[in-house]
Amino acid sequence: MGQGTLVIEEGEKNAGRDLIDRIGKTRPVQLAFWLKPAESSQWYLYIVAEGIDDSNVDQGYREVLRHFQEMPTTPYLDPFQVKLIQDDDPLARAVMEVHRRWGGWHPINYNGRNLGGMSIEGAYLYPLPNTSPVH
C-alpha cells in the first residue's frame, strides 16, 4: 500500500472498487471514498451502504470480511482499512456536497485540507452510483 503518499494509488482504487461492487450485489452502496486523515499514515476506505446503522454495524463488517475473503489476494486493501459510516455522518454529508458541486458522475481527487470537520491530507471519491453526465 502506498502509505505516506498524498495520492491514492491505482491498486487501492481498483481493490476498493472491487469490494464496493461485491457489497453492492447484496445491498446498495450509496457512497464510497478513500480518505487519508492528517494524523494518519494510512488511507481508509469509507463506505455508506443501505441498511447499515449503529444497530447492525457488526453485521456490516461481517459482510465486508466475507466479501473480502472472496476477493483475489491483493496487497492493496486490508479489511481493517474499511470504515462503514451512515449517510448522516459529517464525512458522508461533506462528500455528498462535493459530489453535488461536481456532478457526482466521475471520480474526484479531493485535495482540500478539511472534509466534514476532519483535517485530511487527501481523498478520492468514487462516482455516485447510478449517475451519468448531463448532456
Image: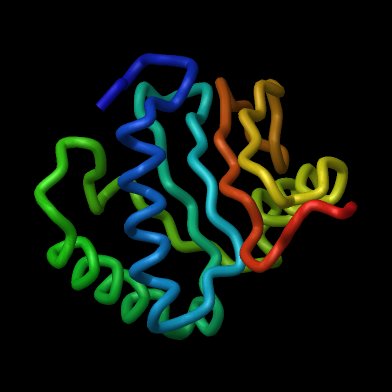
Q: Residue at x 18, y 59 (%)?
A: 71
Left or right: 30 in relation to 4: right
Q: Residue at x 48, y 30 (%)?
A: 36
Q: Is residue 67 above or below residue 9?
A: below
Q: Which residue is drawn at 55% across and 79% down?
A: 50
Q: Is residue 11 above or below residue 65?
A: above
Q: Which residue is drawn at 57% across and 32% down?
A: 123
Q: Is residue 3 above or below residue 27?
A: above
Left or right: 89 in relation to 25: right
Identify the residue at the far left of this view.
73
Quarter placement of the N terminus? top left
Spot occupied by residue 35 in the image (x, y as percentages of width and height): 51, 36
Q: Nearer the viewer, residue 23 or 122?
A: 23
Q: Which of 19 and 105 is in front in this view?
A: 105
State which quadrant residue 21 falls in. Answer: bottom left
Left or right: 4 in relation to 62: right
State which quadrant residue 58 falls in. Answer: bottom left
Spot occupied by residue 73 in the image (x, y as percentages of width and height): 10, 49
